[in-house]
Amino acid sequence: MRPVEELSYTLSTPEGVPISCTLAPIASRLLALILDGLLLGLLGMGILLLVWLSAPTLLASDGFLSALLLLVVFVLRNFYFVLAEIYLGGQTLGKRVIKLRVICRDGGPITPGILLARNLTRELELFFPLAFLAQPEMLVTNSPGIIRLASIFWLVALVLLPIMNQHRARLGDLIAGTLVIRAPEHKLMPDLTEETSNNAFTFSESQLSIYGIKELQALEGILRVDEQRLNLATLESVSEKIQRKIMWQGAQSSPEVFLQAFYTAQRKRLEKELLFGRRKEDKSVITNKAQHNDLDEV
Amino acid sequence: MATIVLKSREFRREREGGWRELEALVERVERKGHSSLTSDELSRLPSLYRATLSSLAVARAISLDQNLLLYLEGLSTRAYLCVYAKRSFFWPLVQEFFLARFSMLVYQQQRLLLFSVGLLLLGILVGYSMVLGSPELFYSFVSPEMAQGRSPASSRDELLSILQHTESKASALSTFASFLFTHNAKIGLLCFSLGVLMGAPVLLLLFSNGLTLGAFGAVYASRGLGFSFWAWVLPHGVTELLAVCLSGVAGFMLAHAVIFPGVYRRVDSLMLRGREAALIMLGAVALFFIAALLEGFFRQLVTSELIRYSVVLGTSGFWLWYFRRAKGAA
């Protein structure tokens, strides 16, 4: 079983340093939409209740009530999203809870006009298909079969658009040039190499030239597992595996101490290589020591 | 060798203070907005952001600490959003839009606007002349619910009664106006969104709107009621048809971007034009609102043809002035 692959997007900032972000999964966007929908329902009812409480006589004539209802529903469903996103800087309340953000594909500032552009199509993308589901006969009355088929095809294509393109963009996103990303929240943890105070272990060049960056970062992941949940068995098996692989002859100690020391030495070695422009992605990349030396001499 | 010296670790030690400071600022902005920062902190935000971005660039080159890289990546994104996705306030935006931006955008698209208006007029003309020639065509241009009992078979008095129909109850009028607005604006929004489909639905919508209007016009004209009919339609019709045409313009802009992307990729061209088209569409929604007020209240309360025609002149004059105002600025 593999974890669901996360789509990432490289955003070019105006400062020239690209940042990579994680695109929001469809499921969380749907969840945010449902939350917003619930909120809209509550908001609509709240406004009606307020009017009813403040001016009950106005509502006595039912004409006014239906006029208000129509207007409130229209304004809410077409302008709630854009107003919320303008006011909260690219988030509706639902997006805020689910931790999603709207960004511009080209890395530029997110202006109100752009937020408007991505939300004006909701009528076609969201409410029209919903209305169609509720009343399928609405769309297909007295039109020839071919038109009916084409309409339904377009409707389905529109709704499925986000899963059919690489940026998970819906129509509004395409028109406005926006993307929805997951708001990042990574905590900075202490540097693992800090804990290696003394150099009880020495590793030879050949022992450090086996693994690459991928293995190093996998080891980092294992070492960074929460203290409480620290799995001794995992540490032990990993440490055993590494010792076998590098043919470790030195002192034996607890797996954690050994792995920490190995991590530090390995990282130092790989980072030094990195400075020379040699990026060893994983263990399958074989560094040809002799060749490097040749090149260095030239 | 007592301790192991790692360049990446030294680098982190040197810069971590700035990152932490930025993180604290960003966290406050995310929770309470930019207004929660003092002016001093606000001016530090961009420089801390740039410093962190440069840290990220350096870290990518020298560090293999996954956690550090992810942290910097995330912090940079959050700070980027704080700097470039500012919260805005509503009223200044609305003012700026209606006083300057909207008329300017429409003025820039005047060729598309003329095209849309032309298409609508062509529809009216075709509908009018065809129904005048063979009245039974009325039924193919106008759906029964739209006709509301009006047809070539109606008597002169039946037709006239609709034109002179007044409603005194304000409640019924507000419902009517509200219904008209939401209905028309919804169609306008669909027209805009459907522009992406190469504009064919937009062409159809504009033309068929014209056909319907022309067909009605012909029915009334055949009973000698043409003058009264246009007095009934045009006071709100000028604004409403303009709004329909503006929705058409917005739709055509999207269509144009998709069909003729020029030097851009299609998605990029759509993005560039889409942002402007959306603003025009917003203006069109406002026009639909004004038209619905005119239709829902004015038309039902005032039957004098003189006043009706003066409103026609007034609204056309106003819109002409409003959109040509941008000429000097453009």
Image (spheres, rainbow, N blue to C red):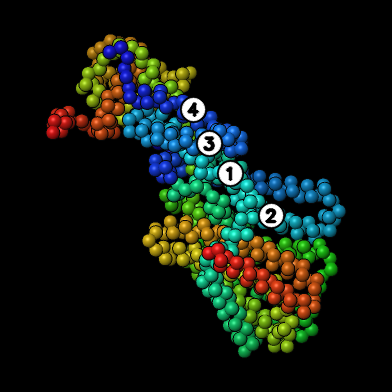
Quarter of the view holding residue B35: top right
Distance Cα–Cα, label 1 vs label 4: 23 Å
Q: Is residue B7 above or below residue A143?
A: above
Q: Image point 37% across, 35% down: which residue?
A: B57
Query: Between tags 4 and 3, which lies in front?
Result: 3
Within 10 angstroms of label 2, few (less than 14), some, or many (20 or more) residues? some
- SS for callout 2: helix
Say which residue label 4 marks: B20
Distance Cα–Cα, label 4 vs label 2: 45 Å
Q: Image point 36% across, 15% down: which residue?
A: A196
Q: What's under tag 1, amino acid-wise?
A: Arg
Q: Is residue A164 above or below residue B163?
A: above
**Disc 1 chain ID:** B
Q: Position of residue B330 (x, y in %)?
A: 53, 64
Q: Is residue B48 left or right of residue A45?
A: left
Say which residue label 1 marks: B87
Q: Compare residues A46 and A129 and report the one nearer the observer.
A: A46
Check chain identity for marks 1 and 4: say if they share one: yes
Q: Are marks 2 and 1 in contact (CB under 8 Å)?
A: no
Q: Which mark is residue B43?
A: 3
User: Does the rendering let one see residue A286?
Assistant: yes
Q: What's under tag 4, amino acid-wise?
A: Arg
